[in-house]
Amino acid sequence: MTVPDSQPVGLNAAVADRLHECAQLAQQVTPGSLLQSVADHLQLTREAHQNSPLVNLRLAEGIAGPLLQTLQDWATLTADAQYWIAAAAFYFCRDADEEPDFSSPLGFEDDAEVLNACLRCIGRSHLCLNVEDYDDV
């Protein structure tokens, strides 16, 4: 699949580069495996949170919700929307992104930023998160 003309905006260059990397990798997996990967990463987050309360489980759950919902709507999404939501899901499932998910209290903030940019890009702004609502770590 080629890169869509519409691009998520508002991301710094490093995060945008990683998102594009994730988009390319995500094209090699099925929507079902992306759904499973999101669920698996959320489970790993729960386990990491038990070992370290600094891992922001609530934000991870907040991110997973719109991802899972949108991935479940896969068949109704345009090709561009599929491209960007797959990229956001793949980004979320990687611990080694802009801010490592399990070793920093800020670990999921970049994931939320990516999710929000992708949701705005595909016309699902109503699913965007306010990161400050999850700032209880």
Image (spheres, helix red, strand yellow):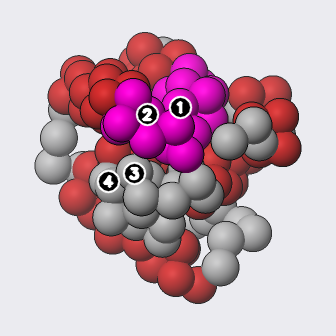
Please state if 43 lies on the left or on the right of 58 as rendered.
left
The answer for how far apart the CA atoms under marks 1 and 2 are is 6 Å
Image spot of residue 86 (x, y percent): 39, 43
Q: Is residue 105 visible?
A: yes
The residue beneath circle 2 is: 49
Residue at (27, 50) in percent of width and height: 26
Magenta residues, dominant SS class:
helix
- Quarter holding the C terminus? top right
Which one is nearer the viewer's eye here, 107 or 1? 107
The residue beneath circle 4 is: 94
The answer for how far apart the CA atoms under marks 2 and 3 are is 8 Å
The answer for how far apart the CA atoms under marks 4 and 2 are is 16 Å
Height in image: 70 above or below 8?
A: above
Q: Earlier in the sequence, mark 4 or mark 3?
A: 4
Q: Earlier in the sequence, mark 2 or mark 3?
A: 2
Report the disc number at residue 102. 3
In the figure, residue 30 lies in which quadrant? top left
Query: Which residues, given as a range, are shown in magenta?
Result: 48-67
Height in image: 50 above or below 24?
A: above
Which one is nearer the viewer's eye here, 48 or 113? 48
Q: Earlier in the sequence, mark 4 or mark 2?
A: 2
Q: Nearer the observer, disc 4 or disc 3?
A: 3
**Given the current orientation, which residue lies at the most extreme bottom position?**
13
The three-letter code of the residue at mark 2 reads: His
Disc 1 + disc 2, Cβ < 8 Å: yes
Please state if 134 lies on the left or on the right of 119 as rendered.
right
